[in-house]
Image: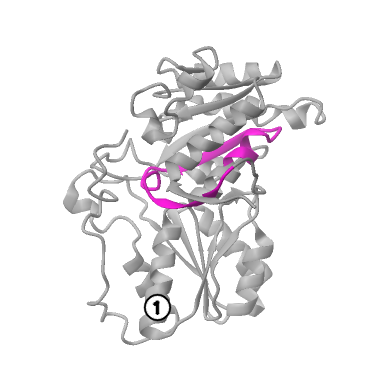
């Protein structure tokens, strides 16, 4: 029996990278800031020291070129783990990803594949504004041939990253920067978590809350408050991967509760949340007791100022109020006893910048 360790989300990522590189000597790890002293929030610390500069190295700021190199290496039998400090700038490489990496397996009748894992950092914080904090997972979700992973907890991050690295096709691995310093348990050694399998974080019968990435933590906090104060039992589903989606888990929960709230870290229009609501409305309409709804970011670029960002992102308070509205609870504005974080644009005092 493997003993659990209680480390951070970042250390789980680091552990997965070390295990993968020990297991397969043809794996390369490179990207922006990989060898930096901070090691991309601590996720790549000591990798160069352990595996050498030929396998772990920094690269110039040229996202399209880096991605092209990883595709070429993959076609030659080398797996690449490519790290980008921000999703925003990776948009320069969308041509390589969409028109090459995602297509080879299908174009050549499954005879050739592109085993690359692309780590992208997402999320708000520290006044980064509209061009440094976007959550554009719905873009990737729209592309056939890609798998998209968005873990919320350390154990899932490790198991899903190992599954991504050893997947024969390209995987987009999205890490919310607010998660890296959060502690939770993960097992030692090698293990994989199936891509496309959701996790029930909290069981309930009154409403289904479907979430992803950092918002899962907000959802779990909201569910606890809803039960403690109102005896509402919310079922919280952490998607873990958004492509493929675990429709079986979502259907089963909605059939039980009859109510659905979907949380999304991205913008509202064209969101993953919207896709889930659409399918539920089409295929499980008769099971619904109320109209399914969502909470996501407004359809405007994210502001930079502390004052304007205060009400921009979804919080546990927003989730609580929305659930109470769906269940027609009249006392929904009396939340004075709700303990909210001191900061709204950074996860805690430990946060000293976006890198």
Residue 169 on the magenta span: yes
* Colour setup of the view: one colour
Tag 1 secondary structure:
helix
Residue 227 on image: x %, y %: 42, 80
Judge left or right: residue 129 versus residue 207.
left
Rendered-image quadrant of the C terminus: top left
The quarter holding residue 144 reads top right
Q: In this picture, which residue range is highlighted in magenta?
A: 161-188
Q: Residue at x 45, y 82 (%)?
A: 232
Residue 269 on the magenta span: no
- Of 72 and 348, nearer the camera is 348
Q: Residue at x 35, y 74 (%)?
A: 321
Q: Is residue 20 visible?
A: yes
Residue 305 on image: x %, y %: 18, 46
Where does label 1 land, which residue? Answer: 226
- Of 296 and 192, nearer the camera is 192
Q: Is residue 270 visible?
A: no
Residue 250 on image: x %, y %: 62, 65
Extreme residue toward the top, this view:
54
């Amino acid at each position: 029996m493997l003993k659990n360790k209680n480390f951070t989300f970042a250390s789980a990522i680091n552990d997965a990278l070390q295990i993968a590189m020990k297991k397969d000597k043809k794996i390369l790890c490179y990207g922006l800031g990989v060898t930096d002293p901070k090691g991309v929030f601590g996720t790549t610390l000591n990798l160069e020291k352990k595996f050498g500069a030929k396998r772990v190295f920094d690269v110039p700021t040229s996202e399209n070129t880096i991605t092209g190199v990883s595709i070429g290496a993959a076609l030659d039998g080398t797996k690449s783990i490519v790290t980008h400090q921000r999703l925003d700038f990776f948009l320069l490489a969308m041509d390589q990803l969409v028109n090459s990496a995602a297509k080879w397996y299908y174009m050549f009748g499954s005879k050739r594949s592109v085993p690359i894992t692309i780590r992208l950092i997402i999320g708000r914080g520290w006044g980064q504004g509209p061009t440094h904090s976007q959550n554009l997972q719905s873009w990737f979700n729209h592309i056939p041939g890609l798998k998209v992973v968005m873990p919320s907890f350390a154990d899932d991050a490790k198991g899903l990253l190992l599954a991504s690295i050893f997947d024969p096709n390209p995987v987009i691995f999205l890490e919310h920067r607010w998660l890296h310093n959060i502690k939770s348990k993960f097992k030692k050694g090698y293990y994989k978590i199936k891509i496309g399998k959701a996790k029930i974080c909290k069981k309930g019968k009154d409403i289904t809350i479907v979430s992803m990435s950092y918002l899962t933590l907000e959802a779990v906090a909201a569910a606890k408050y809803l039960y403690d104060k109102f005896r509402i039992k919310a079922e919280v589903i952490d998607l873990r991967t958004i492509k493929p989606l675990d429709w079986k888990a979502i259907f089963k929960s909605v059939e039980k509760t009859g109510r659905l709230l979907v949380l999304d870290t991205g913008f509202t229009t064209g969101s993953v949340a919207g896709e889930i609501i659409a399918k539920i409305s089409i295929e499980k309409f008769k099971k619904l007791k109320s109209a399914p709804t969502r909470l996501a970011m407004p359809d405007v670029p994210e502001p930079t100022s502390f004052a304007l960002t205060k009400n921009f992102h979804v919080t546990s308070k927003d989730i609580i109020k929305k659930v109470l509205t769906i269940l027609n609870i009249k006392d929904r504005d009396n939340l004075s006893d709700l303990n909210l974080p001191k900061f709204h644009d950074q996860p805690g005092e430990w946060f000293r910048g976006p890198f």
